[in-house]
Amino acid sequence: MTYAIQAEGLAKRFKETEALAGVDLAARTGSVLGLLGPNGAGKTTAVRIFATLLTPDAGRATVAGHDVVREAGVVRSLIGLTGQYAAVDENLTGTENLLLIGRLLGLQRRGARARAAELLDRFRLSDAAGRAVKTFSGGMRRRLDLAASLVGRPSILFLDEPTTGLDPQSRGELWGMLRALIADGATALLTTQYLNEADQLADDIVVIDKGRVIAEGTPDALKSEVGGQVLQVRPLAADDLVRTHALVAETAGTRTQIEGESVTVPVKDAELMPAVVRRLDREGIAVGELTLRRSSLDEVFLALTGHRAEPEESDQPDESAQATDEAGGAVGEHARERAVSST
Amino acid sequence: MTATTMPLAPGRSGRVKPLDGLRQTFTMAWRSLVAVKHNPLELVDYSITPIMFVFLFTYVLGGQMAGSPDAYLKYALPGIIVQNTLFMTMYTAMALNTDLTKGVFDRLRSLPIARSAPLVGRIAADLTKHVWAMLLMIGLGLLLGFRVTGGFGGFLLGALLLVVFAAAVSWSAVLIGMLAGDAEKVQAFGFTLIFPITFTSSAFVVVDTMPGWLQAFSDVNPVTHLSDAFRGLLLGGPVAEPVMWSLVWAAGITLVFCPLAMRAYRAKV
C-alpha cells in the first residue's frame, strides 16, 4: 500500500503552545483522510507543515514520498492548498486570480486562459468571472479558492476547513464539488471540525486533540468502536423529559443526556433497551419514540475527548472568517457552528 | 488527476531557474498593476492628497511664504512630490500586509515559484505607480505655472533619483508590512513617521528660519537632501552635494533595512 501523505512523530511548538506533540498519520494514495479536531487541536499546523509553509520541530512529513523540508520545491509542484480563508486577491476578477496562478506555474497566456475558463465553468463561476472578487459571496470565494488550488492539476490536495463559515446550502454545493474531485482519483487531506463533513467525505479519519492523535479508523469503525450504540428515548409528553432522564440514567448509566426533546445514552449492552422500556412503563411514562442507533461522530468525539466538538452554537455564516493566526498556525477562531450529525 | 499527468511542474527539481523567477516576478507585478484597472480610485487615492497639497501650498500659503503663489509653487512642488513619494511607500507596506494577513502569501508560498517573486514584483509595480504619481503632479504643476527649467535631462535624472530613493525606502516599508498586525496600523505608523520627517526638512521651507537645533536636524535629514537634489535637478542649479547625500542615504537605508526586511519576509512568507 502506498501513502501519498504521511507523517511520523510530527511535532511543532509555538512559544508556549504545543501545537503538535508527535502526530502520525497516513493517507492512502487516492483516498481522503479526514483530520478531525476542535479549534486549536493542531489541524492547521499539520496542513501548513505538509504544504511547506512551516518546518516541523521534530518528526518527518512526506508527500508522495518527498520530504516536505528537504524537497520542498518538489512537494510544491505536486500539491494544491485551500486554506481556511479564501486566499484570493479581492481586487482581481475571478479570471485574473486563476490567470495569475496559471502564469506563475509557467502556463502560456493562452493555456492559462483556457485553464481558468475550464475551472470557472467547473465551479459554476463563469457568470461572475469578470467581476472583482470583492463582490463575490462567501461561497463563491471558497469555490474560487478551491479552483485556484487546482490550476496546476495537483494530484494531492490539502483542504483546510474548506467549508468553515459557509451556510448549509453553499456547504452542500462545495461537498458535491469535492466529491467529484475525489472521484477523479486525487488524494486529499481534509481538516474539519464538522463531524458530518468528515463522515460524508473521508475514507479514513484521524481525530486529534491538543496536538495528539486520539483515535483513528474509518468513520464506521470509529462509530462502532467508541460508545457502540446510542439509545434514544423521546417521551410522548415533553413534561416527562426530566423524569425520563432521571429514570434512564438510573438504568443505563451516567452518560445520559438531554438532546432536544429526547434523552440519549450510549449503550454497549443491547439488553439495556428492554430494561429501560420496562422501567419507563412501570413509572407510567408514555414513550413517543424509542430508537437504538449507532453513535454519531459527534457522540464519538464527545466520548474521545470528553468535550463537545463545538462549545458554542451559531448558525450565522461568517463571511469574515479571515483570522490571522497569532501562533503562526493555530486556528481561525471564527464562524463556529456546531456540527450536528444525523445518522 | 494522477501523479503521472503533471504537465506543469516547473519546480520538479526543487529549484526555480533564474529566468523563471524573473518571469514570475513580472507576473506578480502584473497582478499589482491590473488591480488598478478595477479600482481606478486607487490612483486617485495616490494623487488626491498631493493635488490638494499643491493647491493648498500654492494659493493659501504661497503668498505669505514666498511673496507670490508662483514663486512658492516653484519651491514647494518638488518637496510635495518628495513627500508623496515617501507616503506612497506605505501603500507597499499595506498591500504586503494585506497579502500576509489574508492568506494570499500562503497560497503563493505553496506554489513552486521563486520566493522573492511576490516581494520584488510588488515593489516593481509600486515603483511604476510612483512614476505615475510624479508625472501627474508635475503635469498639474505645469498647468499652474511651474516650469522645468533644468531641462529634460534634469527631469529624467530627478525622476531616476526619486525612484532609487523610493526603492530604498520600500525595504523599510516591507519590514513594517511584515511586522504590523493589520493594514491600518501600517498607515498610522507610516503617517507618524513620515509627517514629521518631511516637515522638518527643506521640502516646504527654507530651513534658515528654523531654530538652531532644528536646523541641525534638518541638515542631516535625508528628506532635505532629496528635496534639494530633486528641486535642483528640475529647476537647474548646483546639485552635486544633495544628490550625493541622497544616494548615500538611499544606500544606507537599503543596507540597514533590506536584510531586516528579507529576514522578516522569510520568517513570515
Image (spheres, grey):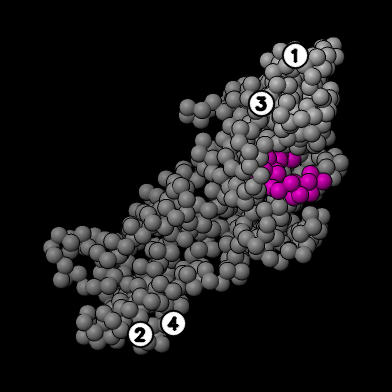
Q: Earlier in the sequence, mark 4 or mark 2?
A: 4
Q: Chain of mark 4?
A: B
**Image quadrant containing the C terminus of chain A:** top right
**Residue A236 appears at what percent x and percent y?**
80, 29
Magenta segment boundaries in residue numbering: A157-176
Q: Count neighbours of disc 4 (C-alpha within 10 A) and say few if under 14, some if 14 to 19, many if 20 or more.
A: few
Q: Amino acid at mark 2?
A: Phe
As measured in the structure, the alpha-carbon distance from the residue carrying label 3 to the one carrying label 1 is 29 Å
As measured in the structure, the alpha-carbon distance from the residue carrying label 1 to the one carrying label 4 is 86 Å
Would you say A17 lies left or right of B160 here?
right
Residue B139 numbered tag: 4
Q: Residue drawn at (70%, 21%), measured in percent from left and top?
A: A243
Task: Report which quarter residue A131 is drawn in.
Answer: bottom right
Instruction: Kindly state the secondary structure of the residue where label 4 is placed.
Output: helix
To which residue does mark 1 refer?
A252
**Residue A216 appears at what percent x and percent y?**
74, 22
As measured in the structure, the alpha-carbon distance from the residue carrying label 2 to the one carrying label 3 is 69 Å
Q: Amino acid at mark 3?
A: Ile
Front residue (pair A132, B69)? A132
